[in-house]
Amino acid sequence: MNEKLKTAVQIGIAIIAVIFIIYGVNREENETVLNKAVNICFECIGLG
């Protein structure tokens, strides 16, 4: 794969990721995601 194309794809994916992060924060879903992550971690280490 051409280096310029590879770099362009990486930048494009990074931009899309930032857009989705901003969209989720605007919908106030960051607390929901954090709560789910904490619950999954507690279950994995056997505290939940």
Image (tube, rainbow, N blue to C red):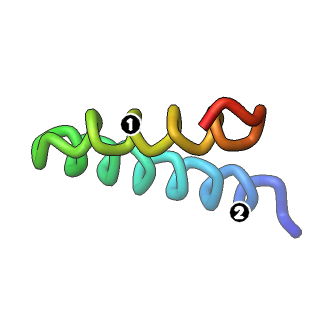
Indicate which disc residue 5 carries. 2
On the picture, is 6 further left or further right than 23? right
Q: Nearer the viewer, residue 38 or 13?
A: 38
Residue 9 against residue 1 in the figure, above or below: above
Q: Is residue 39 above or below residue 47?
A: below
Up/down of 37 relative to 6, above or below: above
Amino acid, disc 2: Leu
* Residue at left offset 41%, top offset 56%: 16
Instruction: Residue 17: give x, y in percent of width and height.
Output: 44, 50
CB atoms at circles 1 and 2 under 8 Å apart? no
State which mark lies toward you, 1 or 2: 1
Residue 15: horizontal and vertical position, in percent?
42, 48
Residue 36 is situated, as x and y percent measured from the top left of the image, at 44, 45
At 66% from the left edge and 30% from the top edge, which residue is drawn? 47
Q: Quadrant of the N terminus?
A: bottom right
Mark 1–mark 2 Cα distance, whole angstroms, equals 38 Å
Disc 1 residue type (three-letter)? Asn
**Residue under the image location 52 percent in, 39 percent down:** 39
Give the mark nearest the N terminus, 1 or 2.
2
Q: Which residue is mark 1?
A: 35
- Is residue 23 or residue 4 the one in the foreground? 23
